[in-house]
Amino acid sequence: MKKPSSVGSRIRERRLFLGMRQTDLAKTIGISPAYLNLIEHDRRRIAGKLLLDIAAALKVESASLSEGAEAALLNGLLQAGAETLGTEVEQDRVEEFAGRFPGWAQLVIELHKDVGGLRQAVQTLSDRLSHDPFLSDSLHEILSSVAAIQSSASILVESNNLEREWQDRFQRNIFEDSARLSQTSQSLVSYLDPDKETETGHATPEEEFDSFLSACNYQLSEMDRGVIKASGYTEIIDTDGSLKSPAAKELALTFLERYEDVEQKLPLQSLMKFEEQGMDPLQIAATSGVSLPDLMFRLSFRSSGGSREYGYVCSDASGALLMRRPSVGFSIPRTGQACPLWPAFEAFSRPLVPQISRIRQFGRDGVSLNCLSVAVPVNDFASGQVPRYQAHMLVWRATDLGRNEVNVGVNCRICTLSDCAARREPSILTDSFDSRGLSGNS
Amino acid sequence: MGKTVLLIEDEPNIIEAVGFILSRDGWRVASHSNGTDAVEEVRRRMPDAIVLDVMLPGRTGFEVLQELRHDPELSVIPVLMLTARGQAKDREMAESLGATQFMTKPFSNSEVLEKMRALVAG
């Protein structure tokens, strides 16, 4: 279910989704089926009026078909230039560079992605030490054992005429601490380097599940078409191999059950009708009777066919991200905490009140995003319990000029926004590694 | 010296080793192995100095330190905080809560003696 990467592939995929024959589409737009076939197999490039006609016939915006090779190359280069500090790039000549040297341009983009991946890995490692209780406890236990061994050994070596009783006691202590150190070290190694049967390449089941969703391109078209129910995915998950740990499989099944539940409340065809009428998410929720969180979930995880791509996060009151759906212009950290400026976290201060805002995430190529956020309770606090809230935030690309736009980041660790009152830790992109965090020595 | 020190540390072998070298240096050593009633133990013994580990059962060393510093009678007792090497945040936290001296694990015996003498000299 990988996303098509070419214009022709997108046209073909959309046509098949609508159940439209090639001859019918060709007739609608006034070209021969043979020519359409060449277009769908990327043997003819199209633009301008023909692209617009095809998009209209397929009931999508032309940008959703054409944002492929050329646009991706330009956007990737602009992003690399914006996110690489200390390098002045000739932004006004990016099209010339991409046009004359597409191979080199692609190489720059790939190298930039690699650097981003390495930064993420560094962040993951430093976050684990700070936020992983098992690692933190293990570290303390190891250091305590070493401290006891060092102290006892020094006493044995440096003390003259040490009484026999004390010699025996400290030798026994060294023996005990050595054994404990060995055991703790082995546990730590097993934790950090699990055996091949459970090795996933991911630090947590949540990351494993996120990768599963990403590989599906955040859509389950078989469920949208009613071909498979959530229960039918059990066997697929077990045999697919992309989800290895039991916890990740459990997360996937819970997600699928929710997907099925929300799909029944708002079938894809009904959703598409609302979208064709130009309704925004608030209007769709009001008209359909579906709750805002359910609608946000539905919009974010759906089959292709919509003219908009949505990004989505769900967070609990501690700031932990429970659900992630990145989109163009909206990156979400895979580990650690997100940017505290996100409207999702402001929603906790005004629960049950939907908020519309405009944001622009730093580091991207200037994509202005509409943002809908709301915090809703997840427990029955009418019975006297303290309400427990989860915040939901939906973003989609804005098409009009921004008003009161707020600059936000991905997270503090890789954000270079200066003078941010909400910053909770230094950025690794601006501070040396020796000042805090990785080297650790104060 | 004849001064008393209370070691608040849950690792018995560290208590034994550190207690040994301090007693050979003239200190009278007492120990306590959890954070839950550590403050009560301090109030009962009124030591001349305290060695306090960060990680304790019950309450953390930070919580104990914070309560000691809020008590007018106990706040004058100097505290040597034991932190883990590589955890700069622990030292920053201890500093902000009013620890007198710091020592990171693992440590040498000479470092322990040096820190303890500085603790009561100041």
Image (cartoon, coloured by chain):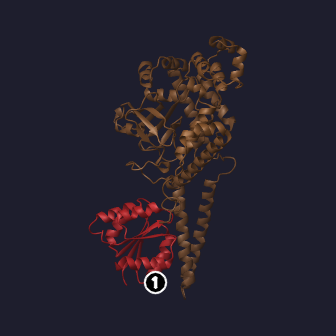
Chain colours: A brown, B red
Three-letter code for the amino acid on which mark 1 is drawn:
Arg
* Chain on which label 1 sits: B
Residue depicted at x 64% and y 47%: A201
Q: Residue A365: where, in percent of width, then height?
A: 51, 38
Q: Is residue A328 above or below residue A287?
A: below
Q: Residue A341: where, in percent of width, then height?
A: 41, 42
Query: Which residue extends farthest bottom?
Result: A161
Which residue occupies the foreground of this view, B45 or A238? A238
Residue depicted at x 50% and y 73%: B107
Which residue occupies the foreground of this view, A442 or B117? A442
Circle 1: is it few (<14), some (14-19), or many (20+) Cα within 10 Å?
Answer: few
Q: In which image quadrant can residue A213 be found?
A: top right
Residue depicted at x 51% and y 36%: A329
- Residue B37 visible in image: no
- For label 1, the SS is helix
Q: Which residue is mark 1?
A: B24
Query: Which residue extends farthest left?
Result: B72
Q: Residue A7: where, in percent of width, then height?
A: 64, 26
Which residue occupies the foreground of this view, A318 or B95? B95
Quadrant holding the N terminus of chain B: bottom left
Which residue occupies the foreground of this view, A250 or B86? B86
Q: Residue A333: where, in percent of width, then height?
A: 52, 44
Q: In which image quadrant can residue A35 be found?
A: top right
In the image: residue A360, left or right of residue A38:
left
